């Protein structure tokens, strides 16, 4: 019965468009760096992540490998799969869906990173590794609810692993490494404490959510939830087409992601936004560009538009902006639009100035040529 339990459909979630978009963008492009969703209790944070599992695409993996290695990407393989590949042994494969792997707040470091059997290593001279959550998370989504309540050391390990794509366990001079590339999704209630700024910066995107204030939308939330609880099967069936349509869009976006183009003006806009908003470091610039490219792909375009940069800036920048003590993060979308418009107007002004100068030079050349011609005639 548990296996057949229906999950609330992702496309049935009312509102919270920014949160849903951030999750979808990370599926399309895991290189964005994950997403942290902050909000008060009861704002569909966990519901959205659970529902996301139904939209995850299928992928090919090495059969029997505890890390679910990609059979075609040698540089992302575990040692066993890589050695087999080098020896010319054909790797048996199977198709499976990506999954959401939970990391409990109470998890210990050994449960997260895995353990090494030191006694076996000393006696047999062989490494015996007991996989942890990071092994299961490879090529999947790692979901941490109430991430702000995790031990700081565990959070550091998670974020380092997310950045490097490798988990290394060391015990008594013995070490073992394995691939651990995952999409990190964290949720938290700011009322229960915040993450350190250094840790916030490691998330590609951060989204703040709050309960709907529109009466009609709140009515929708209530009616849909009650309908789902009364008959999950029938309710989910109503959204099967929209769920499939979103799945198809995600797959198409993944297909064209590497074909999306941008020009130097996009790079200049990204850099200037980062400078004007006073963000620290360069992670914001890189994440903003990756996100803008992914937004274009999600819209099935192969070029980045100004609107993509504006939307990306709102997801990437707020948590990285310098702020004074007790000052709230705020960055109205209108401010970003105005900033980009000003940059565009400045660029057009410079372009017009250059055009005017060229026209003046051409006019001077014409006058000089005419004068020389007149002198020759005399």
Image: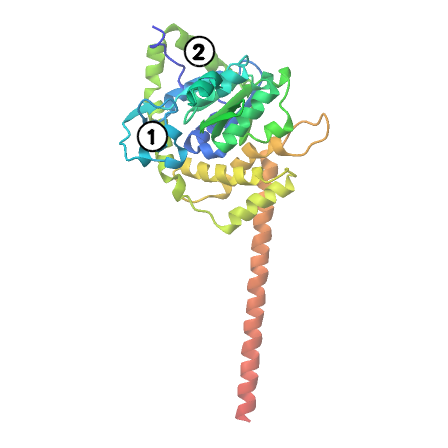
Residue 160, image quadrant: top right
- Residue sitting at 46 percent across and 40 percent down? 293
Q: Is residue 1 above or below residue 272?
A: above
Residue 185 vs residue 214, the one in the foreground: 185
Q: Give the left or right position of residue 246, taking residue 32 as reference.
A: left
The residue that appears at 52% across and 27% down in the rendered structure is: 35
Q: Residue at x 57, y 65 (%)?
A: 356
Whole-percent x and y of residue 341? 57, 45
Q: Which quarter of the figure has residue 329?
A: top right
Residue for point 32% across, 31% down: 84
Mark 1: which secondary structure? helix
Q: Residue furthest front?
A: 123
Residue 168 drawn at (x, y percent): 50, 27
Category of crowding for the residue at label 1, using alpha-carbon neighbours closer than 10 angstroms: few (below 14), some (14–19), many (at least 20) = some
Check residue 225 in the rendering and tell me which mark sits there, or answer none: 2
Q: Secondary structure at mark 2?
A: helix
Does any portion of residue 44 appear in the rendered image? Answer: no
Label 2 crowd bin: few (<14), some (14–19), many (20+), radius 10 Å: some
In the displayed structure image, the side of residue 332 where residue 373 appears, left or right: left
**Front residue of 297 and 109:** 109
Front residue of this view, candidates 73 and 262: 73
The mark nearer the N terminus, 2 or 1, is 2
Q: Is residue 202 above or below residue 217?
A: below
Quadrant showing the C terminus = bottom right
**CB under 8 Å between callouts 2 and 1?**
no
**Quadrant in which residue 323 is drawn:** top right
Identify whether 17 is placed above or below 3: below
Find residue 248 and name its label.
1
Q: Position of residue 348 (x, y in %)?
A: 56, 54
């Amino acid at each position: 019965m548990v296996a057949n339990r229906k999950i609330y459909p992702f496309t049935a979630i009312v509102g919270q468009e920014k949160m849903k978009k951030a999750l979808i963008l990370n599926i399309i492009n895991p290189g964005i760096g994950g997403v942290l969703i902050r909000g008060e209790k009861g704002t569909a944070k966990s519901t959205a992540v659970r529902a996301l599992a139904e939209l995850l695409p299928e992928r090919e993996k090495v059969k029997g490998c505890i890390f679910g290695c990609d059979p075609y990407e040698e540089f992302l393989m575990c040692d066993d799969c890589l050695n087999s590949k080098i020896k010319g042994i054909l790797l048996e494969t199977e198709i499976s869906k990506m999954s959401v792997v939970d990391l409990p707040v109470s998890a210990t470091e050994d449960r997260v990173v895995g353990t090494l059997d030191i006694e076996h290593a000393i006696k047999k001279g062989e490494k015996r590794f007991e996989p942890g959550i990071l092994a299961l998370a490879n090529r999947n989504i790692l979901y941490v609810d109430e991430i702000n309540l995790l031990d700081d050391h565990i959070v550091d390990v998670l974020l380092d692993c997310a950045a490097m794509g490798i988990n290394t366990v060391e015990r008594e001079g013995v070490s073992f490494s394995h691939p651990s590339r995952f999409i990190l999704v964290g949720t938290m209630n700011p009322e229960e404490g915040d993450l350190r700024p250094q840790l916030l910066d490691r998330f590609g995107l951060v989204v703040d959510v709050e309960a709907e204030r529109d009466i009609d939308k709140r009515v929708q939330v209530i009616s849909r939830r009650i309908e789902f609880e009364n008959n999950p099967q029938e309710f989910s069936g109503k959204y099967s087409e929209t769920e499939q349509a979103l799945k198809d869009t995600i797959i198409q976006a993944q297909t064209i992601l590497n074909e999306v183009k941008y020009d130097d003006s996009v790079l200049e806009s990204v850099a200037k936004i980062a400078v004007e908003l006073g963000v620290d470091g360069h992670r914001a610039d890189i994440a903003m560009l990756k996100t803008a490219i992914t937004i274009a792909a999600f819209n099935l375009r192969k070029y980045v538009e100004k609107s993509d940069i504006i939307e990306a800036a709102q997801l990437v920048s707020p948590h990285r902006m310098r702020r004074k003590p007790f000052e709230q993060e705020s960055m109205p979308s209108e401010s970003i639009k105005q900033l980009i418009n000003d940059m565009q107007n400045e660029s057009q002004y410079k372009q017009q100035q250059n055009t005017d100068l060229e026209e003046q030079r051409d006019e001077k050349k014409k006058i000089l040529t005419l004068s020389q011609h007149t002198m020759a005639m005399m």
